[in-house]
Image (tube, rainbow, N blue to C red):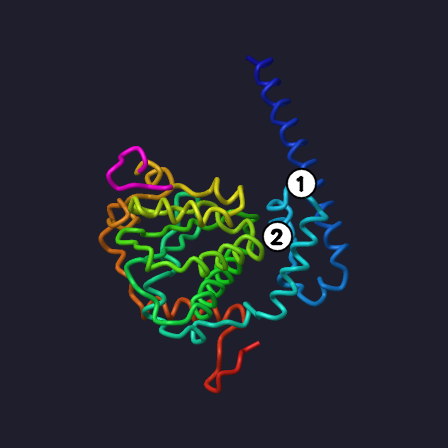
Amino acid sequence: MSGQLKKTTRGEEAAQQRASSSEEQQQEKINEVRGLLDSLTEEMPSFLSDATIRRFLRARSWSTEQATKSLKETVKWRRQYRPDAISWDDIPETENEARRTHVADYLDKNGRSVLVANVPMKQSKVSAKEQIKHLVYLLEYLATNSADEQDDFVVWLTDFRGWSISSTSLSIARESMHIIQNYYPGVIAVAIPFDPPRMFESFWKIAKNFVQPDMKEKVKFVYANKPESLKIMADIFDLDTLESSFGGRSTGTAFHINKYAERMRRADKMRGASKDSNGHNHN
């Protein structure tokens, strides 16, 4: 018995040493990327944290060269687009847009944030440019509020019931995927298209051409009439908190726009993106 205990202890020690070594190697790569980024880390210190650099490294297979290139491109984009300055009050038609896509007030079984989209049910009332701005606002919110997470901290759940070709713009889908994959890599853990109609398959054949291989692996189709695919929902979510419309048991998850607006404004204020009465940012 004591011999078995020693073996177990030695095994645990070896595992800890490997983990420690792996962490040291990761930190070395983070430091290497930080050195390659040079003065950019001083320009955007809050964005270029160790957690962000690690996330980009993971998404680029730990290639310091590729991660540095991606981060430089992202810094250039952030400099021009200013995603950190977008606030809730910058989003036009907030109630309609939030009902289309919002961050749920519950987490999945692994403590990950849930981004819920009801795109087919509600037509957007704003331009493609404003729709992209809302997506960027949500991604920035999720990335900021999950800053301590290394990567893969969002479950993207989209209700595709009632979907039609006319309800989705291929150009918006392409730009959305470009932003997610290039400027927010490693954010999405799993993407769940829920109950898409058969005609969606032809759209997906086109759309997946601009979806990177690692993102394709994260896409899990779920169909309400297939118990084996509904098991995916049970594996990921606590069914007591998941909306009944997604196969859950909760009936108290109605979307309350006023509560949601308060929550988003609080988050804006914490990250310095809130506006005063004159429309100026509080920094």
In the figure, residue 47 lies in which quadrant? bottom right
Q: Nearer the viewer, residue 1 or 99?
A: 99
Which residue corresponds to the image point at 61% horizontal and 23% vertical from the top-left? 9
Q: In the image, residue 86 lies at what x, y percent?
A: 50, 71
Q: CA distance from mark 1 to mark 2?
A: 13 Å
Relative image position of residue 196 (x, y in whole percent): 31, 47
Residue drawn at (54%, 72%), measured in percent from left and top?
A: 85
In the foreground, 229 or 260:
229
Q: Which residues are magenta?
A: 221-229
Task: Say what secondary structure mark 1 lies in.
Answer: helix
Query: Quick one: quadrant of the C terminus?
Result: bottom right
Q: What residue is at 49 percent from the left and 75 percent from the top?
A: 274
Mark 2 highlights which residue?
51
Q: What amino acid type should be assigned to the residue bearing mark 2?
A: Ala
Q: Quadrant of the N terminus?
A: top right
Give the total number of marks visible in the rendering.
Answer: 2
Q: Position of residue 119 (x, y in %)?
A: 34, 59
Q: Position of residue 96 (x, y in %)?
A: 32, 69
- Which residue is label 1 attached to? 23
Q: Which mark is residue 240?
A: none
Q: Height in image: 97 above or below 202?
A: below
Numbered disc 2: secondary structure: helix
Q: Residues within 10 Å of mark 1 (few under 14, many from 20)?
A: few
What amino acid type should be assigned to the residue bearing mark 1?
Glu
- Give the mark nearer the N terminus: 1 vs 2: 1
